[in-house]
Image: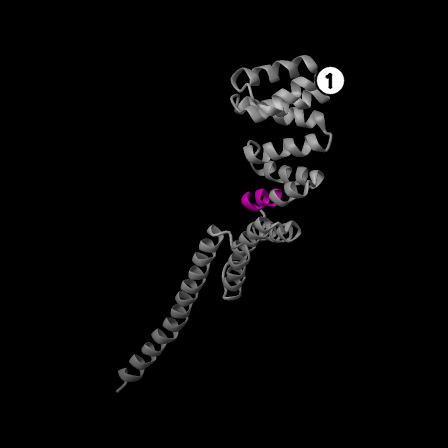
Amino acid sequence: MLRFPRLVARSLIIVAVAVPASRAAAQNERTGSLYRESYALEAKRDYVAALALVREARTAGGSTYFSALRTGWLTYLQGNYAASIVSYTEAVATEPKAIEPKLGLTLPLLAQRNWRELERACAAVLALDPRNVTALARLGIAQYNAANYAGAEATYRRLTEDYPSDLDYKTGLGWALLKLGKKGEARALFAAVLSVSPDNANAKAGMSAL
């Protein structure tokens, strides 16, 4: 008689624990299904519907960081760059030590041609990963277009040292040097590019501008 209440109590504890676990599993299954469908819609370029499912997943209890990151991407694909910046900024605030949301933020800034903010966004990535090639390449573009030719020269030199065969980095360095009046070195770079890619439009334009 003394043991029976104890057994009942234990059973109740097991049930009480099992119910929330079951709910969590159902929630994870639901959000997973929503994201699966969202990716399928993205592949079909239905970005509006794909985004609607991400928002539904977030409402259902999905990851705040992941939903913010994916919202930034899908709004970028829609051409809604202001909304993309807001979402990527939220992702950065949620995971301040992560590189990927900071890199994501550079996409709408690049599309907006917001060179000053793009420089800052790239610098934030490079503070964590000094040799990040994507951040360096976008930094070079931002510096050149903001008429920071000395900065662009330094950035493109780093890139050409790491990737000597990349013709975009070579022509980027050539144009930065040309703007700085270093025409001899610029000519040599454009010639080197044209020797392996005779139809390279950037190198040909650079030669014409000398």
| Camera-side residue of 202 and 181 | 202
Quadrant location of the C terminus?
A: top right
Secondary structure predominantly adopted by residues drawn in magenta: helix
Location of residue 162 with respect to 95 vertically, above or below: above
Which residue shows up at 39% across the image and 73% down it? 19
Residue range of the region highlighted in magenta in the rendering: 97-106
Residue 170 vs residue 24: left or right? right
Mark 1 lies on a secondary structure that is loop
| Camera-side residue of 194 and 53 | 194
Which residue shows up at 27% across the image and 82% down it? 3
- Residue 102 magenta-drawn? yes
In the image, farthest residue toward the bottom: 1
| Camera-side residue of 68 and 99 | 68
Question: From this viewpoint, is residue 157 visible?
Answer: no
Location of residue 71 with respect to 189 vertically, above or below: below
Q: Which residue bears the numbered disc 1? A: 181
Q: Position of residue 41 (x, y in %)?
A: 47, 55
Say few, some or many: other residues with alpha carbon within 10 Å of mark 1 (under 14 / 14 to 19 / 20 or more): few
Q: Position of residue 64 (x, y in %)?
A: 54, 58
